[in-house]
Image (cartoon, helix red, strand yellow):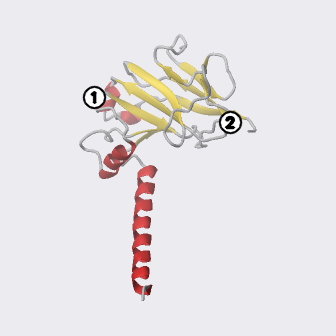
Amino acid sequence: MFRVPLTIAFIFLIAFGGATASAILALRATVGFGAIEIGPWTAWPEAQTEAADPYAKAHRARTGALLLGGAEGLRFMAGSDDEGHALEARCDYTLSGVTPPARFWTLHAIDETGALLLAGDGLPSTYHSQNILKNEDGTFVITASEKPKTGNWLATGNKAVPYQLVLTLFDTPTAGSSRLVDLQMPQIKRGTCHDG
């Protein structure tokens, strides 16, 4: 008696659940189309503009993130080193070089959920263009590690979790440039990995 209605309800439940799960996976997989890759760094210059594709708009709506306008800046993300290995908090990484021209820039690490990767109270979890030690030629070296290092040290904590580095350029001519692929971005070299 209830066999046919229950079968139909079960089919609708599977279809609705599958469609919802696939939409969530698609939104988590990408910020949208039109990504620019420079080494391990990736940016989506059109993600915050009116020209953004539907995936970028849906991703922006889902995360509720406040994105920079095209004239305000550009955000680069790196989830791997120069060799293509995923960034892990149990490993040491050296970021070296220069950033593209910008009035101000920030660098921090985020976990898989997009939350700031905090290593502990009083430990340096972010850097910006005004508090970093630079060489005479304008280059810098930052060590991302769970253990303290001399110079510019970005604390990543002692949990063996993957993370991403986020470099945000504010008031930069880069944001409106079509020559993004010619930019110089900091190199990310993997060092020692600790058992955790």
Q: Which residue is identified by label 1? A: 71
Which quarter of the figure has residue 194?
Answer: top right
Earlier along the polypeptide chain: callout 2 or callout 1?
1
Which quarter of the figure has residue 50?
Answer: top left
Q: Is residue 111 visible?
A: yes
Q: Residue at x 40, y 58 (%)?
A: 23
Position of the N terminus, as image quadrant, is bottom left
SS of the residue under disc 1 = loop
SS of the residue under disc 2 = loop
Residue 90 disc label: 2
- The amino acid type found where label 1 is placed reads Ala
Q: Residue at x 33, y 41 (%)?
A: 47
Where residue 151 appears, as percent x and y from the top left, is: 62, 16
Query: Looking at this rendering, what residue extends furthest in the bottom direction?
Result: 1
Task: State left or right for residue 186 relative to residue 195.
Answer: left
Q: CA distance from mark 2 to mark 1?
A: 37 Å
